[in-house]
Image (cartoon, rainbow, N blue to C red):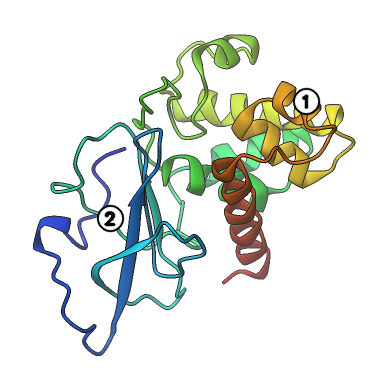
Amino acid sequence: MARWTALLALAAITAAPAPCGAEVIYSFRDRDGVYHFTNVPQDSRYRRSGTISSSPSGLHRVVVRGRSSPAHLTFGPLTAVRTSSYDEHIRIAAERHGLPVSLLKAVMAVESNFNPHAVSEKGASGLMQLMPGTAHDMCVGDIFDPAQNIDGGARYLRYLHDQFGNDLEKVLAAYNAGPEAVRRSGGSIPRIPETQAYVRKVMALYDAYLRGS
């Protein structure tokens, strides 16, 4: 994922104590080559990377997919990002598929940080990070078109809701790891660190959007 609002270039980060109005940022690269950044590390793999200016929301997180080095990356606040460019598409998709607007925003935030051009090294693309096969199955003709991508992601979430009895944690686990992975785990969240972290992050953002924070 690339071209977020430039708040901090990682090449310029130092390990100095955080100044007033700034927060310490931690990061790690997982086994899939995905970089994770946060100011609230909940995983032993996180290591201090530097600082970033604080925002009223308090929580910052970014996932950078398919990059060999974080040296040229920039990132900014994630929680409760204003998504005015896509709000109408989100509202329409949420109403069409019977899902909360806050849920679509939370999934989109974690999946792509609202970058419509995001592509993972595994091939997941667009705002909702749809795999090409899933996009086809969900009637998405142009995977990078925001309206189609959001509708496809919402349609897939609706399908997963119906498959897993509206158990949101299972739905999110299936969105991340695939429904078969959930079924192989006896209908529970797979014991995959990435998937378990993904579910926690989306649930936290979903709650934040519901509260309007």
Disc number for residue 75: 2
Residue 107 appears at what percent x and percent y?
58, 44
Residue 165 appears at what percent x and percent y?
90, 36
Whichever of labels 2 and 1 marks the residue nearer the N terminus, that label is: 2
Q: Quadrant of the N terminus?
A: top left
Residue drawn at (41%, 58%) of the image = 61
List the single residue furthest toward the left.
12
Vertical placement of residue 45 versus 86, above or below: below
Q: Quadrant of the C terminus?
A: bottom right
SS of the residue at dot 2? loop
Disc number for residue 162: none
Residue drawn at (42%, 22%) of the image = 122
Q: Quadrant of residue 54?
A: bottom left
Q: CA distance from mark 2 to mark 1?
A: 36 Å
Q: Residues within 10 Å of mark 1 (few under 14, many from 20)?
A: few
Residue 17 appears at what percent x and percent y?
21, 84
Count up the numbered dots.
2
Vertical placement of residue 94 versus 9, above or below: above
Question: Between 192 and 129, which is closer to the camera in this rendering?
Answer: 192
> In this rendering, would 79 be left or right of 104?
left
Residue 113 appears at what percent x and percent y?
42, 47
Q: Residues within 10 Å of mark 2 (few under 14, many from 20)?
A: many
SS of the residue at dot 1? helix
Q: Circles 2 and 1: CB distance less than 8 Å?
A: no
Residue drawn at (52%, 33%) of the image = 128
Q: Which residue is mark 1?
A: 184
> In this rendering, would 151 be left or right of 63?
right
Question: Between 181 and 203, which is closer to the camera in this rendering?
Answer: 181
Q: Amino acid at mark 2?
A: Phe
Question: Between 17 and 54, which is closer to the camera in this rendering?
Answer: 17
